[in-house]
Image (cartoon, grey):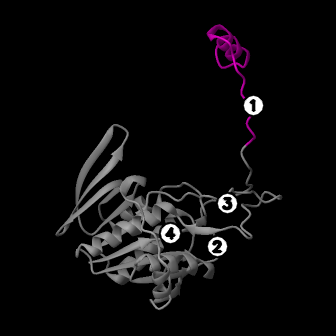
Amino acid sequence: MKIVVGVKRVVDYNVRVRVKPDGSGVALDGVKMSINPFDEIALEEALRIRERGQATEVIAVAIGPDDVQTQLRSALAMGADRAILVKCDAALEPRDVARTLLAVIKQEGAGLAFLGKQAIDDDAGQTGQMLAALWDRPQVSFASKVEITGEVARVTREVDSGLETLEVDLPAVITSDLRLNEPRYIKLPDIMKAKKKPLAVTDMGALGVAAAPQFKVLKTEAPPQRSRGIIVKDVPELVAELKKRGVLA
């Protein structure tokens, strides 16, 4: 069984995001970029499944400009067998990403697709669900534990009321939650080995996919700065202050 793992290039979670002065987007010049943390967790789980002998190959797939090859090399250094870059310079919406991943999955004959539950840049959390719908295969989102037995995946997922365990037939789509695992540390020898691993470059046209954006970003603004808090002496003073601010009637 082949496993396809979606990898997105995002601003590193340790970096403070800055909005461009003209409001046209987020400033990326000189900013550290990394693999989306949830995608890194998904990749780690796919590697563990392969190491247990339940998969033959793990393929990391990313969509974006040439710069995304850096993140794909990181995925190869973690242990992915191959990487595929689908070149696209435009900003893509979840539906177009799902359609592109589906084209790769069908081309590779994959039996499992692993994605992060969401990306930390747009927090859309839609790609995995759309991929499953387009593929017409079962899906389990927010996975915190995954067990593969033959052609069945037993997945524990986090829900509002606690934990829920589902069994789905493969092929399927699984999206990873934060508590699924802790990604491995990449060692220098693995980084050197990753340079020799195959990284294929294609484009959306070659896969028979055309981007069809449905939305247009008009302006990007930073969140308003919060006012300083105050210290109250007792409950009556707290209630009075809340009424003054219109929080309580």
Query: Residue under circle 1?
Result: 228
Mark before the other along the chain sequence, 1 or 3? 3
Q: Position of residue 177 (x, y in %)?
A: 41, 54
Query: Residue under circle 4?
Result: 97
Q: Position of residue 144 (x, y in %)?
A: 34, 53
Q: Is residue 3 left or right of residue 37?
A: left
Mark before the other along the chain sequence, 1 or 4? 4
Name above or below for residue 136 compared with residue 107.
above
- Whether residue 234 appears in magenta in the rendering, the answer is yes
- Whether residue 213 appears in magenta in the rendering, the answer is no
Q: Position of residue 136 (x, y in %)?
A: 32, 65
Q: Nearer the viewer, mark 1 or mark 4?
A: 1
Front residue (pair 140, 179): 179
Query: Residue under circle 2?
Result: 90
**Amino acid type, callout 1:** Arg
Q: Main secondary structure of the magenta part?
A: loop
Mark number, residue 86: none
Real-space CA distance between mark 1 and mark 4, rounded to the nearest whole angstrom: 41 Å
Name above or below for residue 55 compared with residue 243.
below
In this picture, which residue range is highlighted in magenta? 224-249
Query: Residue under circle 3?
Result: 216
Question: Which type of secondary structure does the marked residue at label 2 adopt?
Answer: loop
Q: Quadrant of residue 185?
A: bottom left
Q: Are marks 2 and 4 in contact (CB under 8 Å)?
A: no
Viewport quadrant of the C terminus: top right
Question: Which type of secondary structure does the marked residue at label 1 adopt?
Answer: loop
